[in-house]
Amino acid sequence: MNRIRTLEELIKYHKAKYYIGTPEISDNEYDQLEEELRSLDPTSKVLEIVGSSPKGSRKVSHETKMLSLNKTYKQEELLSWAGDYQIVSTYKIDGVSCSLVYENGELVVGKTRGDGNVGEDITDKAYWMQNIPTKIKDLRKIEVRGEIFCREESFFKLSDEMEGLGLDKPTSQRNIVAGLIGRKENISLCRYIEFQAFDLIENTFELKSEIAKNQRLISLGFDATELIVHKDLKDINVRIKDAANFMDEGDYQIDGLVFSYNDLSLHEELGSTAHHPRYKIAFKYEGIAKVTSIDRIVWQVSRNGVLTPIAEVVPVELSGAKISRVTLHNFGMVKQYNLKKLDKIKIVRSGEVIPKFLELVEESKGKFNYPKSCPSCDSETTIDDIRLRCLNTNCPAQVKEQILNFIQKIGIDDLSSKRLDELISNKLIKEIPDLYDLNIEELMTVDKVKEKLASKLITSIEKSKSVDLATFLGALGIQGGAYNKCEKVVHAGFNTVEKVKNLTIEKLQEVEGFAEKSSGEFVRSFKEKVDLVEKLEQRGFNFKKEERNNTAITQKKICITGSLSRKRSEVEKEIRDMGGIVVGSVSKKTDYLLTNDKLPSSSKFKKATELEIPVVSEEEFAKLIGK
């Protein structure tokens, strides 16, 4: 009983510290406290506590309780929970949960989660935050829930401004959010933090899926979390690896993924416990942290010319591996914490994610320094906000990383980084197209490459010419051009190189998952690669569209909404196979709205009716395509 009481007090203490932005233990250490209490007393009411009690004087109730999430660190538990249902996932942003209430189209209150029943009124601060619309085109009373967070770039600008105001420098992106919304003065600093929506509560039953809810949030003007629909186990594993990469390379902090059942009727049927909904689960990466000290800082040059600081540290063991090198993220992080030799730092390794700097524990004497010239080509470096760059596009390190990225993404087996180094130093390769000019004799000049392996490499290089267009685009290193994004572009009807060349920012915004910023990045970056694409086409890459017989929906734009008798992914595939184009929203360019739920209250149905766009059921659609 004494241990139970001790655990309950520890959990309440650390939960309160976490929610005011001053955590004293890691997420994993906290979760272990909860697991121990659950094993000793699974009925403890402390396990049902959501968030922490608001400390401010302006308290406001939640009409619908804001719950926490059940979580797992094991893929087998995640798959067991998923069962045979269609599930979707989104990044789990490491910030502060927030609720926004709108009446007559205007924002009337913003509030924190608090203890789930009562939160703190932060309406005045919400007006300062990025991505929070003060007016929306819906006069009903609705509630939008999401996460407040701070991007890396904004964090460093905020840090400089706070230092200029004589305030304490923030310690981390997550903690500064809790700190800012708890302040009574300098609330204009909230302009450095932003909101991303993940849930919508309204008194209507027109929405049938998480995807539809997400699209509704976007149509109302919110920056909504990107949802990925999962088809199978392989798809889920890819997503988990993708999130792990984002934890290392992304511009804001996440601590895992949130998986949900796509069908909203299941949400209603399954309900919730006092602590969490049964239709959602968080998948987190178990983080092990230790303290070590920096021996020296080296800078690596990426394929985009960004210099990444790497700390060589006194070796420590994390997750069963001996760690001697950790990423320090970027120039801004080194400057922010004045990192240098002999500093004691806390590092973390979550699952298989690259070990990284977590926080400064004890600072040594002296001041940080950074390379004024590129360690690869000796060109002068440039400070670009939080990043240090080499602007020389012929920089050997950049060229090598671009080629290596292409090799890995296009699927050329056995051509390792070390072998590529030799090919470059022997002047056999200067750019990506040179890979396709290699012969067996040239490859045999590489150390330990005999005729059999050289022949195998040539076969692998030749085979890579026949990959699908989405894989090809994903290998080019387009900004914002991860494989799943390129796949969406191709499936939206831009299924030849010529069509991608003629792609505009406006056209790309019509593709699901592309906002104005990401569309601009993708289009501009691809145009910079056109010369490379044409050189590769000259060497045998060919992505002509497959010849198909015309059907009633060839090149027709079709929007799907509501419930279907089959999985949405199956219907979308059928549309694409028949030459149609799946779009995420209704516009004057839409040719059909496919739905079995012809409800006057549905926003898509209403818009289709206003624009006189044909609305067809699954049965009518089957007749249309001759099935």
Image (cartoon, rainbow, N blue to C red):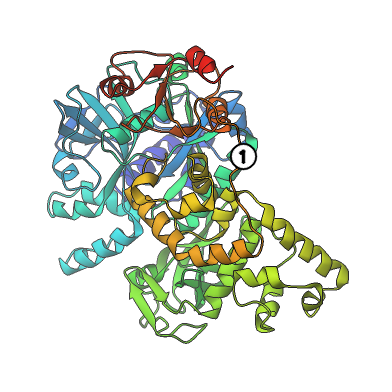
Q: How many marks?
A: 1
* Label 1 crowd bin: few (<14), some (14–19), many (20+), radius 10 Å: few
Considering every residue shown, the one lying at the far bottom of the view is: 378
Foreground: 495 or 564? Answer: 495
Image location (x, y in percent) of residue 28: 50, 46
Q: Is residue 127 left or right of residue 354?
A: left
Foreground: 151 or 27? Answer: 151
Image location (x, y in percent) of residue 454: 81, 69
Considering every residue shown, the one lying at the far front of the view is: 550
Residue appearing at x 41%, y 75% in the figure? 389
Image location (x, y in percent) of residue 406: 60, 62
Tell me the SS state at disc 1: loop
Q: Is residue 466 left or right of residue 270?
A: right
Residue appearing at x 58%, y 67% in the figure? 535
Q: Which residue is mark 1?
A: 547
Q: Above or below — where is 142 with respect to 299?
A: above
Q: Is residue 23 visible?
A: no
Residue 390 appears in which quarter of the rendering? bottom left
> Which quadrant does the C terminus fall into?
top right
Q: Is residue 448 left or right of residue 401?
A: right
Residue appearing at x 36%, y 13% in the figure? 598
Q: Amino acid at mark 1?
A: Glu
Image location (x, y in percent) of residue 344: 45, 71
Q: Is residue 233 visible?
A: yes
Q: Above or below — where is 205 with respect to 326?
A: above
